Image (cartoon, rainbow, N blue to C red):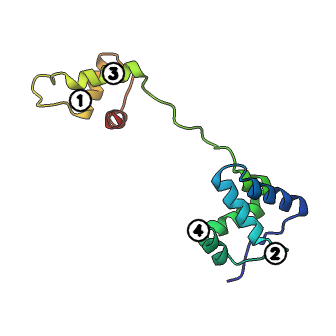
Amino acid sequence: MKKIYIVRLSEQERQVLLSVIRKFKGSSQKVRRAHILIKADVDGPNWNDQQIADAFMCSRQSVESVRKKFVTEGFEVTLNGKKRETPPRVKILDGDQEAAIIALRLSDPPKGHNGWTLRLLAEKVVELEIAPAVSHVTLHKMLKKN
């Protein structure tokens, strides 16, 4: 198969990669990406993707994606990764609210109901002003982890 993304390392980039590999400096993903880039270099060993994948126990697709990232986004981003564009999810309920919801869940259900449903619980939480607004899905995730 013809390679679309060709890795051609400069001498400085090669030295950085060898340093990462020798010192095991950084995360395991960083070390693996360094190995992949060294072996994929056309001016170096120039291994094919399957040989690299077999040598470093990853998929051929992983090797291809490292090649593509190197060509399209550059050396630093490929080696170190990039920061997330979207921040991690913010916790909707704090500990006191979670405790109040759990206590409510363990109490007797309203008259006419055999037990608490998530939707009924969500309505009651808003009614009692434990939280200004809460989804039954949020309550499901919160109760599931506890």
Q: Earlier in the sequence, mark 3 or mark 1?
A: 3
Front: mark 3 or 4: 4
- Alpha carbons under labels 3 and 1: distance apart: 17 Å
Outermost residue toward the right?
Answer: 11
CA separation, marks 4 and 2? 21 Å
Name which of mark 3 and mark 4 comes first in the sequence: 4
Task: In this rendered view, identify the residue nearer to me: 30 or 130.
Answer: 30
Residue behind mark 4: 57
**Amino acid tagged 3:** Ala
Q: Is residue 82 rendered to the left or right of residue 88?
A: right
- Residue 42 is labelled as 2
Can you tell which quarter of the image residue 69 is in?
bottom right
Farthest residue in the front direction? 23
- Where residue 53 appears, as percent x and y from the top left, is 62, 72
Q: The residue under label 2 is which amino acid type? A: Val
Residue 52 visible within the image: yes
Q: Residue at x 69, y 60 (%)?
A: 33
Nearer the N terminus, badge 4 or badge 2? 2
Task: Give the labeled residue for mark 3.
Answer: 99
Whether the residues at callouts 2 and 3 have beta carbons within 8 Å, the answer is: no
Q: Which mark is residue 33?
A: none
Crowdedness near tag 4: few (<14), some (14–19) or many (≥20) residues, C-alpha within 10 Å: few
Q: CA distance from mark 4 to mark 1?
A: 50 Å
Residue highlighted by disc 1? 120
Q: Quadrant of residue 139?
A: top left
